[in-house]
Amino acid sequence: MTWIDFPLYSGIVFAFWVIGLIVLLISYKKKPLIKAANILFTLGWIVLIVFVVKLWIELDRPPMRTLGETRLWYSTFLPLIGFITFFRWKYKWFLGYSFIMAIVFLAINYLNPETYSKTLMPALQSVWFVPHVLVYLFSYAVLAASSIVAIKGWYDNYQGNFKIETLKLADNLVYIGFSFLTLGLLFGALWAKEAWGHYWTWDPKEVWAFLTWMGYLIYIHYRHFHPNKSKQALTILALAFVVLLVCWFGVNYLPVANNSVHTYTD
């Protein structure tokens, strides 16, 4: 079965991506080497996509139920974000970051193998399940990338070589991530109406999802009204990501989560 073969697939992906990172590291302004790195990255990404598709088919359900399965999607989406930003803005460091983080998520899954189940509880058997989870995962991946840009911006400020292009990259990533985050909220509300009869119940997960949405909305408004205050904007962006992390998995450890309708891992 495909999930039993995860070590084999992940090993192949690791090999392509680690070699690609090494080639990228030594490819200073050498286009042939950068192209070679991109080919290696793409080959590993294709192998990972094949695994996800086969896993989806064999489970007969979307592999989006547990944290391990969501980490698998992060490993799939982060390279896509890295490719898009590299081809659009030529940030080689960001391309490398995307694949490093994808490797980290795969490594966590490798070290913590899961027992996959084909069953889905009734609440998850909805037409809104796939679009809701997919857009959220993609938005989280993009917003996580924007936070790394914020950290780099802090570091550049400390070194005295901050460039406004770094903040513009963060802005673009936030705009994309926030758009998908908003779609995720809307899809979730429609799903909740179908499953429980209410669009919004102030469940702990819903509360933190709303706080996450507000955090990035505050950043967008702050950037609009205070375009020259870069350090403060980067701080807001980093804090918004902390709220996102609580929403993603931290809320599961809160006492109030015991009665949450968003607990699907049991």
Image: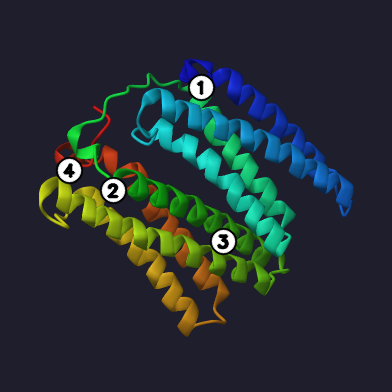
Q: Of 68 and 166, which appears nearest the observer?
A: 68
Give the SS element for disc 3: helix
**Mark 1 and mark 3: span between their CA atoms?**
29 Å
Q: Earlier in the sequence, mark 1 or mark 3?
A: 1
Give the SS element for disc 2: loop
Crowd band around label 3 with a 10 angstrom C-alpha radius: few (<14), some (14–19), many (20+): many
Amino acid found under the numbered disc labelled 1: Leu
Q: Are marks 4 and 3 in contact (CB under 8 Å)?
A: no
Q: Earlier in the sequence, mark 4 or mark 3?
A: 3
* Image side of residue 120 versus residue 148, left or right: left
Crowd band around label 4 with a 10 angstrom C-alpha radius: few (<14), some (14–19), many (20+): few
Name the residue carrying label 4.
Answer: 256
Q: Nearer the viewer, mark 3 or mark 2?
A: 2
**Mark 4 and mark 3: span between their CA atoms?**
31 Å
Name the residue carrying label 2.
Answer: 128
* Image side of residue 32 versus residue 208, left or right: right
**Mark 3 and mark 2: span between their CA atoms?**
33 Å
Q: In the figure, residue 8 lies in which quadrant? A: top right
Amino acid found under the numbered disc labelled 2: Trp
Q: In the figure, residue 182 lies in which quadrant? A: bottom left
Amino acid found under the numbered disc labelled 4: Val
**Mark 1 and mark 4: span between their CA atoms?**
29 Å
Crowd band around label 1 with a 10 angstrom C-alpha radius: few (<14), some (14–19), many (20+): few
Residue 65 in the image, given as x and y percentages of width and height: 33, 34
Name the residue carrying label 3.
Answer: 150
Give the SS element for disc 4: helix
Residue at 12% in and 55% down:
198
Going by the picture, which residue comes out furthest to the bottom? 225
Residue 49 in the image, given as x and y percentages of width and height: 56, 35
Residue 78 in the image, given as x and y percentages of width and height: 56, 46
**Mark 1 and mark 2: span between their CA atoms?**
31 Å
Query: Is 218 rendered above or below residue 128?
Result: below
